[in-house]
Amino acid sequence: MDIILDCSATLACWAWFTLGFILFFSWRYLIYALRVKNPEIHFQRLNSLFYRGFFRILSLTAPRQKIEIDTEAASIKSSVIICNHLSYLDPLLLISLFPQHRTIVKARFFGTPVFGWIITKSGYIPASGEGGFSRLMVNQMETMEQYLKDGGNLFIFPEGTRSRNGKIGELNKGAFKIARMCSAPLYVLQIRNSDRLFTPGRFIFNTRVENTITVRTIKHIPPDRNASPSISGLLQQVRQVYISQQEKDLEEL
């Protein structure tokens, strides 16, 4: 019986990606693409609404799963946001949280039908210039400072991949460089327990356990006009924040 509930919730959520998109969102994307000169912000807001719908279906089909987001995290604007990465659900959760957002996506996804068109129109940034996407990457970076000043957020998972054991991995410098380059605040977020619902290596959601997925701010670093400490020093500072927070979390268990 439990596995049937898991499968039902999983299928209902993934069905949203096809039926929900076709019925409620495809025509909206098309209208903005055809009638708005620069549809980036409109696409981002549609993306956010789409994934809010996804998590709404999840809450209805998997009532044992709760999502808690602290008020500071929910109110972030005009900032570079870094976050740990436990599950494929993590980017969907942050997209649903921030109506105006950019993020970095693996370059190969930009070449996929429909999805590639949406993420390109949404102003998302390819992780590398492979496959001829270098011009797109440059264009997005050139407008990043103004985009952040206008209230947008850039969120990045600096580990580059999901953690398999919950511990923080090595962090890439990209997000820290962008924050410095744009003189933008840097917010460090922590997601907990998303991997308990959607475990790496599994397709079926694990809805049978009581679980609360949390998103919380664990550090806010204002812009440093003097560029001190160095990028490497800032990276190590943030990494230590994650390690210290994980140790506190273990002590609370």
Image: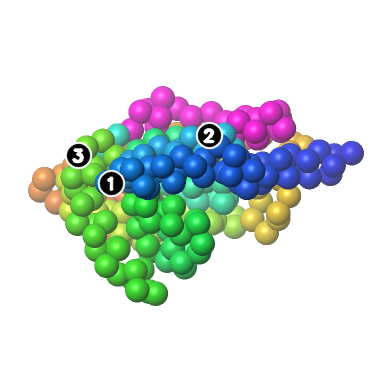
Provide residue 199's location: percent of width, then percent of height: 66, 51
Tell me what residue is drawn at x 24 percent, y 63 percent: 138
Residue type for callout 3: Lys
How far separated are the C-alphas under marks 2 and 1? 24 Å
Furthest-right residue in this view: 1
Tell me what residue is drawn at x 40 percent, y 37 percent: 45
Which-is-in-front pick, marks 2 and 1?
1
- Compare residues 151 and 196 and report the one nearer the observer: 151
- Compare residues 216 and 136 and report the one nearer the observer: 136
Label number found at residue 38: 1
Q: Answer with mark 2 or mark 1, whichever residue precedes in sequence.
A: 1
**Residue bearing the label numbered 2:** 52
Residue type for callout 1: Asn
Label 1, secondary structure: give it: loop
Mark 3 burial class by Cα count in 10 Å: few <14, some 14-19, many 20+: some
**Residue bearing the label numbered 3:** 149
Which-is-in-front pick, marks 3 and 1?
1
